[in-house]
Image (cartoon, rainbow, N blue to C red):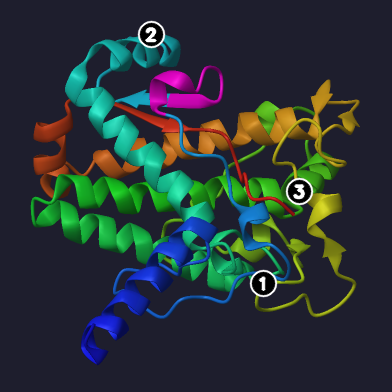
Amino acid sequence: MSAHSRRLLFVLRVVVSCFTAGACASGAGGGAATAPPPGDAAAHRADPPKGFAALGRERGAITTLSGATPQDREKLIEQTPRSLECADAIVHAQWQQDIAGVADPEKHFDNCQIDSGLEYLRGEYGRAREAAGRGEAVRALHHLGHVLHSLEDFYAHTDFVEFAVTRYDRWEAVPTPPLWRAPNDGDLAAWLPGGKSGTIAWERGTCPSSPIGHKYLNKDNGDSERGKEWIEKWGLSHYRATFNLTRVACSRFLKEAFGDEATWRNVLAHCGTDYGFALTFDKRKD
């Protein structure tokens, strides 16, 4: 075997190993691989992605029409091949961000990287709009999936819900900030003054003071330490409050995005009127 062939084989092995371990970096323009977390990187992988139809209650849906409940639309998406194809593209992108961005705190609002998280979220929304304008429907949906993942992690990984509990008597009264808009359209400091998020040791960045471990703050599932805590005046757990607020925020974002029909014309023509997404939050292992 020639030296060139051996080098090529080595590169291929590294690439395959990288994706198997779930430690490859991903971005709009590519980039170098991110170092895996300490220990066995495979232990930090999320479960393989489920399609929209297999998500059960861990999903949401919106329609560009009116007069139908989200539950009706979820079932209709399963029965409509092109809608299901587009929903699966969004769901896969949401899962992919867990894996490709495993060590990037801005993609998950970890380590108090809230400003950089907003910058990343808005950047992905911009890339989604650019792809939609070029008629690249699948690529546009891919970037939308990243935005949705970031929106979900904002509620699950920061102390937004904890702060809202001190201000509002019902979860339904809690406003959902339009994080995807430019800063002058909504000052996050007014929504989350001095906001914090959980720290993960093997990610970049850190909290400036009094860090809270991701293990103790995340509301990714109903069994997490914070997720199972009961909110007496809301009558539900921190996880369920996070789930409810996230469904509202994601639905609001998609409806606002697709309301710009001129930009999304090609995507709307490709996918139709109904769009599904996952509400499974972060599946990385701590």
Q: Earlier in the sequence, mark 2 or mark 3?
A: 2
Residue type highlighted by circle 2: Asp
Pointer 2: what residue? 72
- Residue 24 image offset from top left, x and y in percent: 46, 67
Q: Earlier in the sequence, mark 2 or mark 1?
A: 2
Q: In the figure, is residue 13 to the left or right of 157?
A: left
Q: Specify the segment rendered in magenta.
A: 51-60
Q: Secondary structure at mark 1?
A: loop
The reply to whether residue 7 is in sight is: yes
Instruction: Measure the C-alpha gap from mark 2 to mark 1.
Output: 40 Å
As for residue 53 lying within the magenta part, the answer is yes
Q: Is label 2 in contact with label 3 (beta carbons under 8 Å)?
A: no
Q: Judge whether 188 appears above or below 45 on screen.
A: below
- Residue 198 image offset from top left, x and y in percent: 77, 60
- Residue 13 image offset from top left, x and y in percent: 39, 69
Residue, x 65% and y 77% (percent of image)? 204
- Residue 282 image offset from top left, x and y in percent: 61, 46
**Crowd class of label 3 (few under 14; some 14 to 19; many from 20; radius 10 Å):** many
Instruction: Measure the C-alpha gap from mark 2 to mark 3.
Output: 31 Å
Q: Secondary structure at mark 3?
A: loop
As for residue 1 lying within the magenta part, the answer is no
Residue type highlighted by circle 1: Glu
State which quadrant residue 277 falls in: top left
Q: In the figure, is residue 168 to the left or right of 137?
A: right
Pointer 3: what residue? 218
- Residues 156 and 32: in front is 32
State which quadrant residue 117 falls in: bottom right
